[in-house]
Amino acid sequence: MRILVLSDIHSNLEALEACLAEVPDCDAIVNLGDIVGYGASPNEVTARSRELGGSFVRGNHDKVVAGLDDVASFNPIAGLAALWNREQLASDHLEWLRVLPKGPLALPHLARVQFVHGAPEDEDRYVITIEDSLKTLLDGEVSVTFFGHTHVQGLFCLHDDVAETAYPEYPTIGNRETCEFQLESDTTYMINPGSVGQPRDGDWRAAFAVFDFDKWVITFFRVPYDLRSAQERIFAANLPARLATRLAAGR
């Protein structure tokens, strides 16, 4: 069984469509949240996400845009974008965002695998370093935790009390590329598919992952997209210019 794992689309329609055009055949889709925020296509991205279906967990931007959390928790640029996204969204899309479930999410056909936005015990916690991952890796009840929130593609793992970090390596910064990791049965993992719409690992390309549950293989993807169009939408919406320029830097 192959599962498409998407995260942190952030209202970037061009990036989402580029990813979907490159997705191999999959049996299920899981979206780790932050469908909206930052970008300038909240209605289009929400509609496309709903059309794709699958399973969802909510992200912190989904909560703020939907009015479930206070915008004061965001920095000024993120807050402005969240309020703009809220104003633009159709009422049915807002209601759909409001009822997205809180993680962790478990699927009945995927034993010992869970899906969260930030971390299992706190959906808003950033797992950035190996130290951040240890609470989850040491839990022992789940073998694989998929998470988003940091916009950094890669994984943390724990084997024989040794914790390690691994990031995919790509030869270029402009082509469609993949990187595979063979997972081990006696190791626990936290895996981030990367951000579709606003990568922050220095690679501007849209990111996602496919998990082959039967083969226990994770395949990371990086996909170029129409960056200029995504930026022009942000400028046209009079959103902060930083939201557009950072896309080119992958930061």
Image: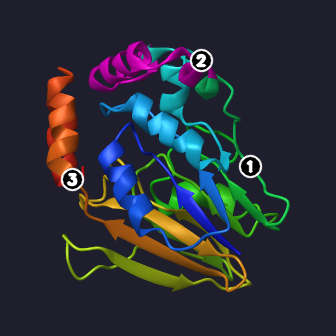
Q: Which residues are magenta?
A: 72-95
Left or right placement of residue 40 versus residue 63 in this view: left
Q: Please name the residue shown 45% across and 46% down the image.
A: 8
Task: Specify the principal SS of the magenta part.
Answer: helix
The kind of residue tagged 2 is Leu
- Rate crowding at label 1 as few (under 14), some (14 to 19) or many (20 or more) other CA atoms within 10 Å: many
Q: Residue at x 73, y 84 (%)?
A: 185
The residue singled out by tag 1 in the image is: 105
Residue 233 is left or right of residue 113, and the answer is left
Residue 42 spot, x, y in % from top left: 40, 30
Question: Looking at the rendering, in which quadrant would you find the N terminus?
Answer: bottom right
Query: Vertical placement of 47 versus 31: above or below?
Result: above
Residue 237: which quarter of the image? top left
Query: Which quadrant of the structure image shows residue 178?
Result: bottom left
> What's the residue type where badge 3 is placed?
Asp
Q: Between 143 and 197, which is closer to the camera in this rendering?
A: 197
Q: Residue at x 34, y 33 (%)?
A: 41
Disc 3 vs disc 1: which is toward the camera? 3
Q: CA distance from mark 3 to mark 1?
A: 32 Å
User: Residue 24 colored magenta?
Assistant: no
Q: Earlier in the sequence, mark 3 or mark 1?
A: 1
N-term mark: 2 or 3 = 2
Mark 1 lies on a secondary structure that is: loop
Marking on residue 226: 3
Label 2: how many residues lie within 10 Å, few (<14), some (14-19) or many (20+)? some
